[in-house]
Amino acid sequence: MPERNSAIRFARISRAKESPCAFVPVKGSGLSQPLQPSKIIAVGLNYHSHARELNMPVPENPILFLKPLTALAAHGETISYPASSRQVDYEGELALVIGKPGRNIPEDGAYEYLLGYTLANDITARDLQKQDGQWTRAKSFDGFCPIGPVVKPRLKPEQLEIRTLLNGQLKQKGSPADFIFSVPRIIAFVSEIMTVYPGDVILTGTPPGVGPMQRGDRVRVECDEIGVLENRILET
Ligand code: MG
């Protein structure tokens, strides 16, 4: 069930796979804090190629929105297809996990605040997004934010390739080398608005090729250096 303890399950899954980063050390206490976000932040348009695909101008600053914690789902969880939508899209994305609290983080020190990288699917009810003129309903259904399977530290984002497959067929492929806003720029920009805490997740935007899923589909976001995040859309 994609209920509100999915974030806790994410931490457990990370631990099961022996990720070195399933828990965040609490400075000076000798204790660790479980990986649970206080918020999920997402960047709306962050690939030059996706902006070209949509024929949209490159934004001056990152366009941010939030997804609720109740949207979290773990690798392997089944996602419900909302009755109120007729078009539910996948958006495979690289996600950042924050490692220590920060506010007004400078770009040149941003990596110090990063615990590591994981994968996410920013599932979106596209018809409701267009209908509402803003994104909260479209992006916020329970289960609309699968994240995982583990957090990997110290990767070079511009060398990664993020792929999305629908029923085994490649639909999206992109690299942070094509980002409009770099990882440090995103962290600096977000932390100028809100304090970031350990476990907070930042979705970095999706490459070209977003498209609809049907009931019963299997959607997979993968990256060689991180792993596989796969979820099935409920049949009914
Ligand atoms: Mg997105």
Image (tube, rainbow, N blue to C red):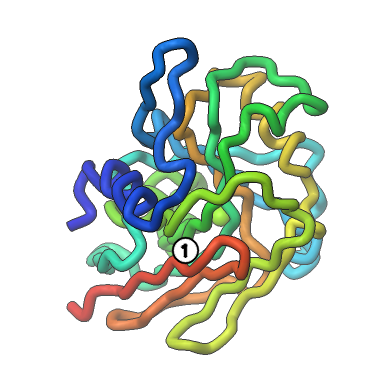
Above or below, comparing residue 191 to residue 60 in the picture:
above
Residue at the image point whose x is 35% and y is 82% from the top? 217
| Rendering quarter of residue 107 | top right
Give the quarter of the figure containing the C terminus.
bottom left
Residue at the image point whose x is 67% and y is 45% from the top? 154
Give the quarter of the figure containing the N terminus.
bottom left
For the residue pair 212 and 167, the one nearer the viewer reads as 167
Is residue 188 visible from the viewing direction of this image? yes
| Rendering quarter of residue 43 | top right
Residue 96 place in picture, x, y as percent:
58, 44
Above or below, comparing residue 219 to residue 73 in the picture:
below
Residue 95 place in picture, x, y as percent:
56, 49
Q: Secondary structure at mark 1?
A: helix
Outermost residue toward the top in this view = 28
Left or right of 22, for residue 50: right
Residue 180 place in picture, x, y as percent:
80, 49
Mark 1: few/some/many CA within 10 Å (<14, 14-19, 20+): some
For the residue pair 69 and 18, the one nearer the viewer reads as 18
Amino acid at circle 1: Arg
Where is ligand 1, by quadrant? bottom right
Residue 142 place in picture, x, y as percent:
27, 52
Residue at the image point whose x is 40% and y is 29% from the top? 38
Is residue 72 visible from the viewing direction of this image? no
Above or below, comparing residue 70 to residue 82 in the picture:
above
Residue on which the image places disc 1? 126
The total of numbered circles placed on residues is: 1
Mark 1 near ligand 1 (CB under 8 Å)? Answer: no
For the residue pair 84 and 121, the one nearer the viewer reads as 121
Outermost residue toward the front in this view = 30
Residue at the image point whose x is 39% and y is 36% from the top? 35
